[in-house]
Image (cartoon, rainbow, N blue to C red):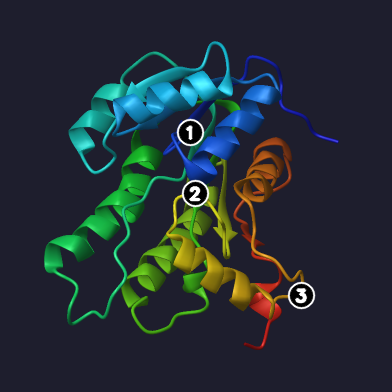
Amino acid sequence: MPTLERNTQVLVIGGSAGIGFAIAKLFHQQGATVTLAGRNAARLSQAAHDIGAEVATVALDVTQPAELERFFARPTRWKHIIVTAASLTFGPVRSVALEDAQRIFDSKFWAAYHIARLAPFDEDASLTLVSGRFAQRAGPQTALISAVNAGIEGFARGLASELSPVRVNVLSPGFVDTGMHPEALVQKMRQRSQSLPVKRIARPEDIASAALLLATNPMISGTVLAVDGGDTVSFT
């Protein structure tokens, strides 16, 4: 079974909380040299402390191309980059402010574009992006989220050819209790999860193990991996 080599250079963008934090923690436990990147330096510092020794942090706003250019101009060559950062706004298209709609794409699609264009990769490297269930299951107030997620998936398929032999994949989580949602929303997700084949919502650790699979399996590229408890085959 493929494993993560010790001291492998891993960058988790959006790693201070939720899914990104769980991924960073798992990769660190596997012996990787982990760098956390995100906008909030204090949260990054706390996350690094919670994960363990020798976790580096860097304050980085992925919506600012100039910041990404400066960061990736460093001599570090990355073995694995996982991008979980996003700033999402739910709501009807006619009521979401234009600046909020633009921020959705700046933080997710255009950030992925700049990272793919700028990041220096090591040999046998991988880039993992994150989409989500709304790429396939659009609904009221999710048109913009659906669009950006679908864009990420199409972009990654093209990148898998363009960046070869760097492997490019997408994680597509379903309902995830990240510990960052209001309790009312968590309860609603738990109720809806009863219609899923697995009968529960995911934990961040469930998504992290899938990220490790994509990073370590040398034969997976151009793949969208649904980690959704069977949501894509559910009829509700």
Q: Characterize the local packing of mark 3: few (<14), some (14-19) or many (20 or more) Cα atoms within 10 angstroms.
A: few
Distance from disc 1 to disc 2, alpha carbons, whole Å, reads 10 Å
Identify the secondary structure beneath mark 3: loop
Q: What residue does disc 1 label? A: 12
- With respect to residue 117, does 203 lie above or below? below
Q: Residues within 10 Å of mark 2 (few under 14, many from 20)?
A: many
Q: Say whether residue 68 is left or right of residue 46.
A: left
- Residue that mark 3 sits on: 197
Residue at the outermost left position: 98
**Quarter containing the N terminus:** top right
- In the image, farthest residue toward the right: 1
SS type, badge 2 = strand
- For the C terminus, the image quarter is bottom right
Q: Residue at x 63, y 14 (%)?
A: 7
Q: Amino acid at mark 2?
A: Leu
Q: Position of residue 126 (x, y in %)?
A: 57, 37
Q: Residue 181, percent across and down? A: 44, 57
In this orientation, which residue lies closer to the viewer: 7 or 14? 14
Task: Name the residue type under label 3.
Answer: Pro
- Check disc 1 and report its element: helix, strand or loop: strand
Left or right, 211 with reference to 42 = right
Q: Which residue is mark 2?
A: 129
Q: Classify residue 25 as left or right of residue 17.
A: right
* Distance Cα–Cα, label 3 vs label 2: 25 Å
